[in-house]
Image (cartoon, coloured by chain):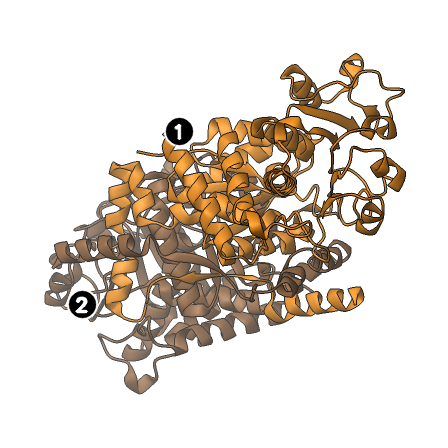
Chain colours: A orange, B brown
Amino acid sequence: MKNNLKQRSLKLHEDNRGKIEVISKIRVETSDDLSLAYSPGVAEPCLKIKDNPEDIYKYTAKGNMIAIVTDGSAVLGLGNIGPHASLPVMEGKAILFKEFAGVDAFPICLNTQDPEEIISIVKNISPSFGGINLEDISAPNCVFIERRLKEELDIPVFHDDQHGTAIVTIAALINACRLTNRRLEDLEVVLSGTGAAGSSIARLLKDVGVKKVYGYNMEGVILKSKYDNYSFSEKELIDQSVISFPTNLQNDSLKALIENKDVFIGVSAKNLVTKDMVRSMNKDPFIFAMANPDPEISVEDALEANAYIIGTGRSDYPNQINNVLAFPGLFRGALDSKSTKITESMKLHAAKAIAYIIKDEELKRDYIIPSPFDKRVVKAVAKAVSDEVIRLKIYRK
Amino acid sequence: MKNNLKQRSLKLHEDNRGKIEVISKIRVETSDDLSLAYSPGVAEPCLKIKDNPEDIYKYTAKGNMIAIVTDGSAVLGLGNIGPHASLPVMEGKAILFKEFAGVDAFPICLNTQDPEEIISIVKNISPSFGGINLEDISAPNCVFIERRLKEELDIPVFHDDQHGTAIVTIAALINACRLTNRRLEDLEVVLSGTGAAGSSIARLLKDVGVKKVYGYNMEGVILKSKYDNYSFSEKELIDQSVISFPTNLQNDSLKALIENKDVFIGVSAKNLVTKDMVRSMNKDPFIFAMANPDPEISVEDALEANAYIIGTGRSDYPNQINNVLAFPGLFRGALDSKSTKITESMKLHAAKAIAYIIKDEELKRDYIIPSPFDKRVVKAVAKAVSDEVIRLKIYRK
C-alpha cells in the first residue's frame, strides 16, 4: 500500500509534468484584446502605479499572489535535499493555497542557503508578491530570516513550519479542553522540541492562556542553570518567561519531567515517549505527538497507556494536526484585509476559529480537529484573521 | 478613441485584478488526493530528483516554466518606471506566452537595478524555471546581464527587447526581398540606433547574408575614427566587422548616410527621417521605422515619399513588427527540444520560419509579416528552433 502510494504519486507528477500552471484571466484572441492587455493599453495601469504605488493592488495580480520561498534545507522529513529536489513540495503547497483558499502562490526555490542572501533576494523579488510564505527552511536560519523580513517588508511574511503547526496544535488543545471541561490556565504542558516550531508553539500556548509550559530538548529538560548552552531562540523563551522551570525534579530526563503533567506536545523525534511515561501523567492526558513521519509515541501505545486525546501529524489516524487547516485561511484573511503583517494575535484568532468549527456537542475524543476538507474552515479562519487585522488597524490604507 | 483604449485597459485590469493566476493541474478533493500531491506521497518525486537532478523536468512544472525578469528600467516606451509599475507589462507578457504558445511564465519584478545583483538573483531563483526571459532592462546593463546569465546558467536565456524585434525585422526583410526579387546580399542597410536592440539587429542582418550595414546613433554616423567614443557594444560591432563604414560621405548626418541606400531600419527616435531623405534612397526602398510609440517617419509620409515597404511597431498600420511573432514560438521550441541555450542560429531560423508562413503568391506590400493571431506562426517557429537545437546538439541529455 505504501509502495503503491509512492508509485501513484510518481505517476501523478509525471503525467501532469508537475502540478502548477500559470494561466491568463483574460482573453487574448483579437488585436483589440492585445492592445488592451499589452501594448499600447497596458501603459495606462503602469502609469497609474507609477503615480500611486498602492494602485499595484488594483491593477495587477500582486494582491492575491504569494511567494512560497524555500532554500531546500529542511524539506518535509527529508532534510537538506536542496532547492531542486524541494520543488515538488513547493508546487504542492502552491496548489493547496489555490484549491483551499483561492490564493495564487508561486514556488521560489533558492539556490543559496545563506540567510543574508535569502533575505536580500526575497526583498528584491517582493514587488511581484502580496505575501511571503517561507517554507522548509532549517532552524535557526528560518527564525532569523522570518524576523528580518517581517521588519523590512510591508507585506505579510509567515514561516509555515514554525507557526502552522503551532496554530493547529493550539486549536486541538482548545478543543481537548472544551471536551473535557478543563481550563487552559490549569494545564501543565510538556513541550518536547524547542527549535523553530517548538518556540512558536510555546509562545502561542502562553498567548492562549496556558500558565505552565516546560521545555525539553535533546540535551534534557530546559533549565535556567543550562542557559549558556541554549540556542538564540531557546534563550529568548527563557528571557521572555515563556518557558517555566520545573522544581524538585529527580533528574533532567523527559521521564522525570512528564510525571504529573497534563499535556505532552512533541515536535521532536520518534519513540521518545513510552507507555509508562504516559501512565505517569495526570489523569486523562492529552498527547500531541507530531514528529514526522513517526510520532514520539504510536497512537496504539498512547491509547493503551490511557491517553485521553491523541493527535499526530499522520493522515491515517484521527486528529491530524495538519497545517493545511491554517495557512490557506490565514493568508486569505491577511490578503483580503490588506494586512501589512502577520501578528501573534492573528495566529491565535486563527487557532480559535479552527477549534470552534466543531460544535460542543460534536466534539469527541477522536474529533477535536476539523477535516482539512471542511469548507467552513478557510472561511472561518479568514474572517477571524481579517477581523483582527481591522481591529489592530494594520492594513494598507 | 485613444482615451477610450486607456479607460478600457484600466477597467480590464481592475475588473480582473491583474491578468495572471496560478492554478493546479490536478484535483485536491480527497484525503487520497492530498497524500499523493502533498505529504507523504510528494516525498517520492523529491527523492527521485535528489538522486537524479534531471528528473526535475519529469516531475515538476519547471520544464514549461519561464521567469519574466525585469528591473523596470526601460519599460515599453515609458522609461525607468521601476519594478512595481512594470508589473502590468510583465503580466501581459506572461499571458502572451501562455495564450500563444502554452508556455507558463511568471513575472519577477526586481527591486534592484544593479547588474551584479540581478545576475545573482536570477541564478539563485533559477531552480524553479526552465528558461529566463529578460524584459525591459535598459542598455547597456541588459547586454551584460544576458551575456553573463547565458554563460552561467544551463537553461535558455533571452532578452526579448534585444532580440525579439531583431528576429521579426529580419523576417520582414526576407519577405520584402522575396516580394521584390531582391537579394539580401545586395542590400545596403542603414541602421539607426546601435544600442541593445540595434546591435542584435545588426548581427542578425549579417547572419542572414546582408553585406553592408551602416550604423547611426545620436552622435552621428558610426565611423572608425570615432571609435573611442563608442559604447562597449558599439565597439564590439566594429571589432567584429558587423558594421561597415561608408566612404565619401559629405558629413556624418543621417541625411548624408541614407542617400542611395536600400533599407532604413530604425530603433531610435521619432521624426528622424524626412520625406526628402526617403526620396534620396535607392528606388523602392524598405523602411522599418520602429521607434515607439511614434516611428522615425510616419507611415503616411513614407508612403508619400515612395517607400515601397513600410513596417512599424504600430498595430494600427500594416506590417507590424511585433515581438509576439517571435518569443512564444522561440521558447516553445527551446523548451520542447530541451535546449540549454538560445543561439544566434536559433534566432535566424525563427526569423525564416516567420517569413515563410506567407507564401510567395500571398506576399504584398502591406502583407510581409503574418498576423500575430495566425496559429501557424508559433508552430513553425517552435519547429524551426527545435530542429536547430537538435542539429546543434545543445539539448539536455
Confirm or deny contact between disc 1 and disc 2 (CB under 8 A).
Answer: no
Residue at 81%, 30% in the rendered image: A258
Look at the picture and state if A354 lies above or below B101.
above
The reply to whether label 1 and label 2 mark residues of one chain is no
Count neighbours of disc 2 (C-alpha within 10 A) and say few if under 14, some if 14 to 19, many if 20 or more: many
Residue B181: image x %, image y %? Answer: 31, 79
Quarter residue B98 falls in: bottom left
Q: CA distance from mark 1 to mark 2?
A: 67 Å
Task: Indicate the secondary structure of the residue bearing disc 1.
Answer: helix
Count neighbours of disc 1 (C-alpha within 10 A) and say few if under 14, some if 14 to 19, many if 20 or more: few
Residue assigned mark 2: B307
Residue at 49%, 57% in the rendered image: A375
In the shown orientation, is residue A132 left or right of residue B76? right
Image quarter (top left, top right, bottom left or bottom right) of the C terminus of chain B? bottom right
Residue at 84%, 44% in the rendered image: A305
Residue B296: image x %, image y %? Answer: 20, 54
Residue A12: image x %, image y %? Answer: 65, 68
Q: Amino acid at mark 2?
A: Ala
Look at the picture and state if B109 lies above or below A234.
below
Residue assigned mark 1: A392
Residue A154: image x %, image y %? Answer: 42, 32
Q: Nearer the viewer, residue A115 or A39?
A: A115
Chain letter of the residue beneath label 2 in the structure image: B
Task: Indicate the secondary structure of the residue bearing disc 2.
Answer: loop
Q: Amino acid at mark 1?
A: Leu
